[in-house]
């Protein structure tokens, strides 16, 4: 069995949220226009140590096609480009700029000790500053859920091992009871962030944010924009929106990630939806929780995205932008039955494997229902 560890650990949040069911929501035309109508785009990450990049090779033609689709078909005006390789980030940023998109430039080096990050982010910030001087509309993202995805803040040598520490942090935040260990972890976390920001500010003159996991406690005074990953699981609509109150700090507030998998019941699991996939067999079929193959439902994913956008664009939310996670995730290809790993991803398009004729075309994907739904919503927002 090949273990899949595509962890977006707001799933730990999902395990601890209220048990009220999702409300029935429809996108409201009377919502407040947002500055950033965004989509997350992955140019290659290592979700486990020493694993290949989630996007194995740089294909300029495919990147250009995808980014054009984000701008013209999805009617987005912003893109969060995340990846480890700085050259890929730079290339994708220039393409996005040509399509008129604002870019949230998100270098992300997972599964390395946190003491390696300041130098990495300083290098990335230097590249971002050159882009900014070219006239590119750019926001620098100085990390994402660092305490989980990097070594040295929470105990554990892997993402899975560090999940226990995440749950402890969430529990402390919910109960208001912080022991010395928890305080020390958060102090170390903010100390590393401060070191990162010193290097970033020395190289980059534009706006900077961070993509915070719900368990983290960022010292936001050093950032220009408050950025949070804000998935919804079983919270009521009111609970989901009210959680934003904690982040109203007289700075722009942006939801850096929200999305859903595409199978029945995934909406109630929020960021934890992918965890029903435990691994894969040698033939490429999935190993699913309780030996039950989920029922694919693109409508579930589309409904989730529409509902959360309706809430987040409401006047009570007060957010200036939202980024839907994620455009594509080729690591989880589309197939039939137990080989349909795509339904366990958050992608807006279904990517076909290379051994299928469609997987050899340009592009090697087709839009899902969520793609079409998001297109209509963003087009309506853009008309305001």
Image (cartoon, grey):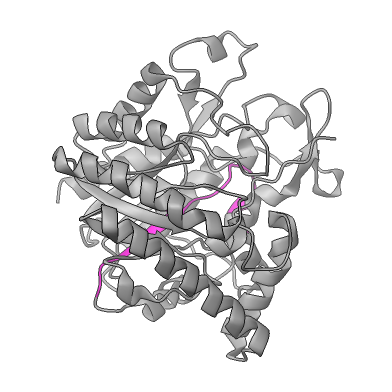
* Residue nearer the viewer, 351 or 209: 209
Q: Is residue 9 left or right of residue 222?
A: right
The N terminus lies in quadrant: top right
Report the magenta residues as a range.
251-270
Q: Is residue 22 above or below residue 43?
A: below
Quadrant in the rendering for residue 164: bottom right
The residue located at (67%, 24%) in the rendering is 335
Q: Residue 372's spot in the image, x, y percent? A: 39, 35
At 41% from the left edge and 36% from the top edge, which residue is drawn?
Answer: 371
Q: Is residue 163 visible?
A: yes
Q: Is-magenta flag for residue 264?
A: yes
Q: Nearer the viewer, residue 355 or 166?
A: 166
Residue closer to the observer: 351 or 121: 121
Relative to residue 237, is residue 105 drawn left or right?
A: left
Task: Give the answer, above or below, for where 212 lies relative to 83.
Answer: below
Give x and y (percent) for residue 323.
Answer: 37, 51
Q: Image point 85% across, 49% down: which residue?
A: 290
Q: Position of residue 154 (x, y in %)?
A: 66, 68
Q: Is residue 374 magenta?
A: no
Query: What's the residue at 37%, 52% (across, down)?
Result: 122
x then y, percent, for residue 342: 61, 33
For residue 293, side relative to residue 252 (left or right): right
Whether residue 236 is visible? no
């Amino acid at each position: 069995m090949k273990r899949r560890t595509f962890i977006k650990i707001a799933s730990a949040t999902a395990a601890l949220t209220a048990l009220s069911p999702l409300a029935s929501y429809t996108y409201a035309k009377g919502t407040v226009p947002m500055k950033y109508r965004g989509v997350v785009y992955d140019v290659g990450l290592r979700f486990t140590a020493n694993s290949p990049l989630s996007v194995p090779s740089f294909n300029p033609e495919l990147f250009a096609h995808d980014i054009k689709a984000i701008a013209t078909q999805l009617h987005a005006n912003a893109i969060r480009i995340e990846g480890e390789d700085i050259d890929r980030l730079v290339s994708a940023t220039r393409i996005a700029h040509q399509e008129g998109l604002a870019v949230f430039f998100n270098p992300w080096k997972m599964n390395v000790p946190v003491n390696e990050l300041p130098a990495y982010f300083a290098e990335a910030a230097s590249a971002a500053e050159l882009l900014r001087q070219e006239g590119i509309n750019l926001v620098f993202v100085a990390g994402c859920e660092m305490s989980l995805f990097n070594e040295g803040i929470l105990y554990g040598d892997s993402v899975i091992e560090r999940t226990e520490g995440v749950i402890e942090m969430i529990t402390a935040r919910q109960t208001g009871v912080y022991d010395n260990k928890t305080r020390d972890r958060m102090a170390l976390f903010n100390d590393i962030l401060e070191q990162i920001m010193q290097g970033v500010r020395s190289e980059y003159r534009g706006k900077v944010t961070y993509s915070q996991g719900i368990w983290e406690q960022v010292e936001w005074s050093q950032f220009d924009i408050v950025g949070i990953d804000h998935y919804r699981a079983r919270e009521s609509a009111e609970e989901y929106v009210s959680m934003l109150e904690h982040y109203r700090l007289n700075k722009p507030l942006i939801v850096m990630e929200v999305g859903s998998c595409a199978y029945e019941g995934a909406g109630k699991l929020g960021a934890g939806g992918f965890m029903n996939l435990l691994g894969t067999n040698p033939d490429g079929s999935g190993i699913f929780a309780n030996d039950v193959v989920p029922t694919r439902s693109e409508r579930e994913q589309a409904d989730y995205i529409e509902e959360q956008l309706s809430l987040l664009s409401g006047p009570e939310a007060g957010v200036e932008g939202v980024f839907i996670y994620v455009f594509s995730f080729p690591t989880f290809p589309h197939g039939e039955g137990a080989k349909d790993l795509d339904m366990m991803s958050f992608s807006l398009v279904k990517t076909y494997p290379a051994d299928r004729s469609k997987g050899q075309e340009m592009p090697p994907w087709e839009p899902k229902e969520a793609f079409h739904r998001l297109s209509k919503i963003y087009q309506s927002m853009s008309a305001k």
